């Protein structure tokens, strides 16, 4: 499972283990699965899709401004706003 | 000696003051908890952003064409002091301490021949106008919000960055009160522009052996991160301030309540003595009157 964290300046919105997350990067959307290569990318305003399990209907979270970081411990999305 | 009636009125008025300070103390205590929770909730973001900033800054070399927010304007003449205070008073020495810290820094800088400008965030910083009537370049009111929104900090940060780009100042310092406990708030000043990169904090977070891929590239990410970092620092200062303000108010109102209690006790003794004296005088008059017969 992929450890996924969504943080805004106001609070820690999500911290959970999921199957896959699709992130709206500045240079295009990218999906992050477990074991993804280390990556840092800025994000554009858009919809973040969280797939809890393979094949499940994704949950959509609208985010604004920020960046995403993938490292050995998982995916961290720092967004200015998340709804 | 005050008359019995005057004493009675005085006791009544102190009692109602005590009621108010007691209520304010309890409200501050409740708000303090919320403000503290908010400050705690904001910590993960700030910590991660700091780690990312450090790892990025260590990869990018500062040169003439790096973003101004990182490299500075190349000058060190005009200093801007951003003074974050609260919107309301009656919080002990909270605002006074912040303003005092800012004034101290201003005097230091002026002694070095620098130009000092002020940027006020919060109504209670306005006392600075009295000392530096011409140096206050902006007066930003925070408004009466129940909880601090990041958007408020963003507004201040955007304004600051725009002024920086126009060359209105070279260095910016931020003044606020760091929250330690309900009893202790430390007035703090820190440099926010140009961004002080944590020296020696070459991050180990990403050095898992694998090379990190940057999208678009280090410089572009850093350029986007820098203004965000300013906003975050201001937001954190506001959060710390909010908690400090309530803590300071709670302590101040607790003291006021206790003082009022002491005062009531003292006045009551005075009142009872005066009453007893009046009774004694009356008795003496009656007895001496009876003896004279």
Image (cartoon, grey):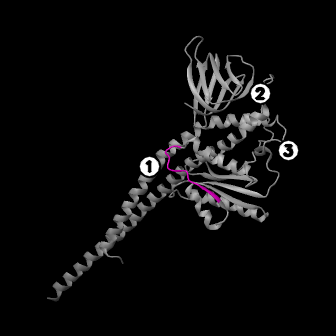
> Could you tell me if residue B180 is visible in this image?
no
Query: Quick one: label 3 or label 2, which is nearer the N terminus?
Result: 3
Work out which residue is located at the far left of the displayed protein and give it.
Answer: B293
Instruction: Please give left or right for residue B106 compared with residue B71 in the image.
Output: left
Q: Are marks 1 and 2 in contact (CB under 8 Å)?
A: no
Real-space Cα distance between discs 1 and 2? 50 Å
- Which of B176/B126 is in front? B126
- On whether disc 3 and disc 2 are found on a single subunit, the reply is yes
Quote the CA–CA distance across marks 3 and 2: 22 Å
Quarter holding residue B115:
bottom right
Please state the horizontal and vertical placement of residue B187, each as a whole percent of the image.
64, 54
Q: How would you classify the magenta stretch by its main secondary structure?
A: loop
Q: Which residue is mark 1?
A: B26
The answer to whether marks 3 and 1 sit on the same chain is: yes
Q: Nearer the viewer, mark 1 or mark 2?
A: 2
- Crowding at dot 1, Cα within 10 Å, few <14 / some 14-19 / many 20+, comes out as some
- Name the mark on residue B214: 2
Q: Which mark is residue B95?
A: none
Report the span colored magenta.
Answer: B137-147
Q: CA distance from mark 3 to mark 1?
A: 54 Å
Crowding at mark 3 (Cα within 10 Å: few <14, some 14-19, many 20+): few
Disc 2, SS: strand
Relative to B41, say whether A60 is above or below: above
Q: Picture coordinates of residue B185 (x, y %)?
A: 60, 51
Q: Which residue is mark 3?
A: B64
Q: Which residue appears at 76% of the width and 34% of the height?
A: B220
């Amino acid at each position: 499972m992929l450890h996924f964290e969504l943080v805004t300046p106001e609070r820690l919105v999500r911290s959970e283990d999921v199957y896959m997350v699709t992130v709206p990067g500045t240079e295009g959307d990218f999906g992050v699965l477990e074991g993804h290569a280390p990556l840092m990318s800025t994000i554009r305003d858009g919809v973040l899709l969280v797939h809890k399990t393979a094949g499940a209907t994704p949950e959509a979270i609208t985010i604004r401004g920020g960046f995403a970081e993938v490292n050995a411990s998982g995916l961290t999305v720092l967004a200015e706003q998340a709804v | 000696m005050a008359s019995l009636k005057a004493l009675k009125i005085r006791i009544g008025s102190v009692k109602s003051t005590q009621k108010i300070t007691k209520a304010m103390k309890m409200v501050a205590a409740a708000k303090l908890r919320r403000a503290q929770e908010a400050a705690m909730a904001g910590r993960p973001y700030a910590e991660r952003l700091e780690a990312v900033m450090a790892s990025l800054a260590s990869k990018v070399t500062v040169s003439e064409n790096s973003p101004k927010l990182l490299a500075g304007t190349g000058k060190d003449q005009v200093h801007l002091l951003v003074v974050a205070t609260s919107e309301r008073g009656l919080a002990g020495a909270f605002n006074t301490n912040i303003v005092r810290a800012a004034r101290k820094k201003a005097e230091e800088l002026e002694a070095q021949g620098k130009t000092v400008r002020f940027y006020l965030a919060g109504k209670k910083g306005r006392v600075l106008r009295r000392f530096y009537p011409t140096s206050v370049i902006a007066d930003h009111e925070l408004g009466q919000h129940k909880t601090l929104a990041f958007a408020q900090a963003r507004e201040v940060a955007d304004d600051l960055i725009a002024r920086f780009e126009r060359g209105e100042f070279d260095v910016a310092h931020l003044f606020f009160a760091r929250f330690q406990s309900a009893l202790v708030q430390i007035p703090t000043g820190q440099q926010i522009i140009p961004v002080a990169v944590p020296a020696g904090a070459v991050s180990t977070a990403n050095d898992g052996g694998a090379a990190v891929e940057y999208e678009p590239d280090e410089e572009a990410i850093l350029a986007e991160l820098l203004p965000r970092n300013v906003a975050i620092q201001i937001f954190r200062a506001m959060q710390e301030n909010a908690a400090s303000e309530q803590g300071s108010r709670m302590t101040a109102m607790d003291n006021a309540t206790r003082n009022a209690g002491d005062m009531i006790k003292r006045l009551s003794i005075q009142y009872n003595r005066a009453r007893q004296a009046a009774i004694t005088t009356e008795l003496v008059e009656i007895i001496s009157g009876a003896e004279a017969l």
